[in-house]
Image (tube, rainbow, N blue to C red):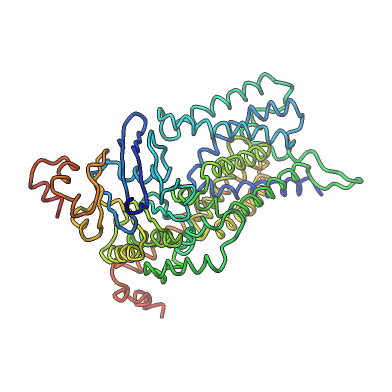
Amino acid sequence: MSFAVGVLLLAIVTAMACALPGVFVVLRRSSMLVDAIGHAVLPGIVIGYALTRDLGSPLLILGAALAGLVVVLGAEWLGRTGLLTGDSPQGLIFPALFAAGVIAVTLNFGNVHLDTHAVLVGDLNLAAFEQWIVGGVSFGPTYLYVMLAVLAGNIAFIAIMYRHLTVTTFDPGFASSIGIRTGAVQTAFMFLVSVTVTAAFHASGAILVLALVVVPAATAHLLSRRLPATLLLAVVIAAGGAAAGFGLAYVLDAATSAGMAVFYGLLFAVALAIVKVRERRRHRQRPTVAGPSSQLPHPHGLHPHRG
Amino acid sequence: MSTPTAARTRSLSVAYRSTPVLRNVDLDVPEGVVLGIVGPNGAGKSTLLKAMLGLVRPLTGTSEFFGRPLSQVRQRVAYMPQSASVDWDFPATVSGVVGMGTYGRLGWLRRPGRTEHEATLRALEHVGIADLAERQIGELSGGQRQRTFLARALAQHPDLLLMDEPFQGVDARSQQAIVAVLHAMRSQGRTVVLVHHDLATVRDYCDHVALLNERLVAAGPVGEAFTRENVRTTYDVTDTDALADLLT
């Protein structure tokens, strides 16, 4: 497998792995929590790297993901004390953790070779550097297989927990009333997000991972009206945008994750424009929305020129 | 000893941080009645339902249903939250939301089958929105949203239904449809508890009433408990005109 194809596949699989849980993140309105997790996992990654010497190590990913969960649970606990409101508990915890990670990186703690640039936006080329070679044949970057495992894990989790995730996301009070342990579902899901964000960190950095998780899902949400369709569309948008973003970055010789994030932003803007135009057209066709249907003007009556 | 109770609370108290919301509420809900919980804004009406169901943790006190703790009789109890508490832009259809009413019986791995599908369909028909089954929930009117929530609760086949403000933002037709369902439930011996804010319709909709303002002021059959004096105490009004306004 050529190096460029390996990077392209890595970009696509990473984007798909992020977009899938992203749908529930968007529906739960916890996008900023992902940003917090993306930052908070840094010290976990630095320590994990010092111990394992491998950014793709499953142990490092799980360990750092636990650090991400510290933000989720810590913020919930601080919120329950009632002393802070809104998302300020998150804002209290993650900068401190991120800063600790930055200091550890600067001090070259345990000879970690991470520069601040890679921490912010990631480096797909570096991530794809280590190839899996069997009998002299390259099977692509080993990191690709880590991300494939994360993608498979996300698919399995969502498939098994689909009803629980849906009902706790839509109506947590009702979910509790029928005996679903809403808090446990939420924690398990946030751990999954944390694992995904940690795994994707290598490819996208602490900041742009938010774009991979949230933007394809938000775009899909704008364009679809059934949850299965939203999930499918998010994955398709993620993959398409990753390929296009990779192309953009390749031509401009820029960071791949930046190319992807810009492309996702453009896709979202286009989707928003389509939805707005469609809405306006619908309003123009149905000026008496509140009236009984028999009094609605015939849709063609407004456009006699259409025949 | 006495008539069987569908729900009972004993010295139930709830506080949000240091502000008390409910104080020592002892409420008995007899089986087979429609009981309205009334009281001014901030009286703790919704909180009472949530505390009974364990959705907010009470400071003191206990709740039981049909003489048992909730965990043993969960299948017999349904809860209908305020429709404003959820995001109606959620990508789901009406039948998808109503189908959630069958999840409690399904457990972890069993997928909804024929029984669940039929329960969903019957519930949709019962509240008169079968024609909206495949509609996206964001396109519903206020009354249709409440009927969707009611259908979801009916799909649970509850013996006791706890409803939080079921008539909020509802047109007259939906209101009639909801009341008809509640009275049908009562005639089958099932029990309904609803948080209600319109005192003028209490006599039409409910046969029992609980007047609440942090404390339980009075509770019992409408004829005995729903007196001008009790309403005056609950709403803390001294002026007769203001009282008349409340009651019409």
* Relative depth, front residue between A159 and B209: B209
Residue A169 seen anywhere in this rendered image of the structure? no
- A275 over B11 or under it: above or below: below
Q: Quadrant of residue B26?
A: top left
- B3 over B213 or under it: above or below: below
Q: Is residue B220 left or right of residue A303?
A: left
Where in the figure is residue B156, as x and y percent of width and height?
Answer: 46, 59
* Relative depth, front residue between B232 and A295: B232
Residue A21 seen anywhere in this rendered image of the structure? yes
User: Which residue reaches farthest left?
Assistant: B240
Where in the figure is residue B174, as x and y percent of width and height?
Answer: 30, 64
* Relative depth, front residue between B222 and A91: B222
Q: How many marks?
A: 0
The residue depicted at 30 percent of the width and 51 percent of the height is: B195
- B247 over B17 or under it: above or below: below
Where in the figure is residue A298, as x and y percent of width and height?
Answer: 35, 77
User: Which residue reaches farthest bottom?
Assistant: A307
The residue depicted at 76 percent of the width and 45 percent of the height is: A145
* Relative depth, front residue between B187 and B41: B187
Q: Is residue B11 left or right of residue A146?
A: left
- Quadrant location, the C terminus of chain B: bottom left
Q: Is residue B123 left or right of residue B246?
A: right
Where in the figure is residue A104, as x and y percent of width and height?
Answer: 65, 21
- B210 over B16 or under it: above or below: below
User: Which residue reaches farthest top?
Assistant: A107
User: Which residue reaches farthest front?
Assistant: B1
